[in-house]
Image (cartoon, rainbow, N blue to C red):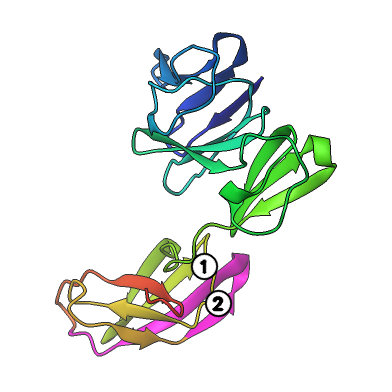
Amino acid sequence: TDVAADAARNVYIVDAGNYHIDKVTPAGQLSVWAFDGNFGVPIDGAQLSSPIRNIYNIAVDQEDGTVYVTDADDHVLKISGGQVSRYAGTGTAAASVAGPALASPMDRPYGVALGNNGLYVADFGNHTVDFIAPPQTVPSPPRNLTVTPTAGGAQVSFRPPRFDGGLPIQRYEYTADGGASWHTLATTPVSGGRLSGTVAGLADGTAYQLLVRAVNGLGG
């Protein structure tokens, strides 16, 4: 009933009639990737050991490969690190309620899509789109970092994190010593939705590994 791909070009196929998810690698190899092929209430645990009832849609996080699927019998499930877990819904069909995702009923959640700061679910029976924010945490890493050497320093450019951790990003920091010390990086917007900043105080002719992180109220 649905198909999605990850950043490594693996394709995930919702095989609803067989009650599992298939994975096809870029080399064309197919395997059963999740669920045990039986009809039943999903169980938290190993992703190949849980039954599923009415698997419907799928979304893949392009940053970390986490997979989200809807069980139209009133659950949203998360698959990560070889484990499947219930992510939203109580398994009872009823009106959704604002608050903890696992404490709110749903009524036939069908579509699922990832946004910049959370998951959107088409709650068909309630005629709503539900938003599920992940737990507050530090931001995900800045993306597509490029470094251009300059005299005594470097110019860095990057895209902001896909996820701000559920809190506003307060600043960006850089390290040139493997994370032993971090320094504030002043940034300005440039074209293509990127940010640019200048790193000074580097010795010409010396190799450095520059890393950049985003910082919110919980850290970076």
Looking at the image, which residue sits at the far bottom?
201
Q: Secondary structure at mark 2?
A: loop
Amino acid carrying mark 2 in the image: Pro
**161 vs 87: above or below:** below
On the rendered structure, is 204 left or right of 15?
Answer: left
Q: Quadrant of residue 186?
A: bottom left
Decide which of 157, 174 is in the foreground and name it. Answer: 174
2 part of magenta stretch: no
Residue range of the region highlighted in magenta in the rendering: 187-203
Looking at the image, which residue sits at the far top?
18
Q: Residues within 10 Å of mark 1 (few under 14, many from 20)?
A: many
**77 vs 47: above or below:** below
Label total for image = 2
Q: Residue at x 17, y 78 (%)?
A: 180
Q: Position of residue 130 (x, y in %)?
A: 72, 50
Most common secondary structure along the magenta stretch: strand
**Viewer can see residue 115:** no
Q: Quadrant of residue 68?
A: top right
Q: Residue at x 26, y 87 (%)?
A: 152
On the rendered structure, is 14 left or right of 32?
Answer: right
Q: Which residue is mark 2?
A: 168
For the C terminus, which image quadrant?
A: bottom left
**72 vs 27: above or below:** below
Amino acid carrying mark 1 in the image: Asp
Decide which of 102, 79 is in the foreground and name it. Answer: 102
Q: Position of residue 181 (x, y in %)?
A: 21, 82
Q: Which residue is mark 1?
A: 164
For the N terminus, which image quadrant?
A: top right
Q: Position of residue 52 (x, y in %)?
A: 54, 21
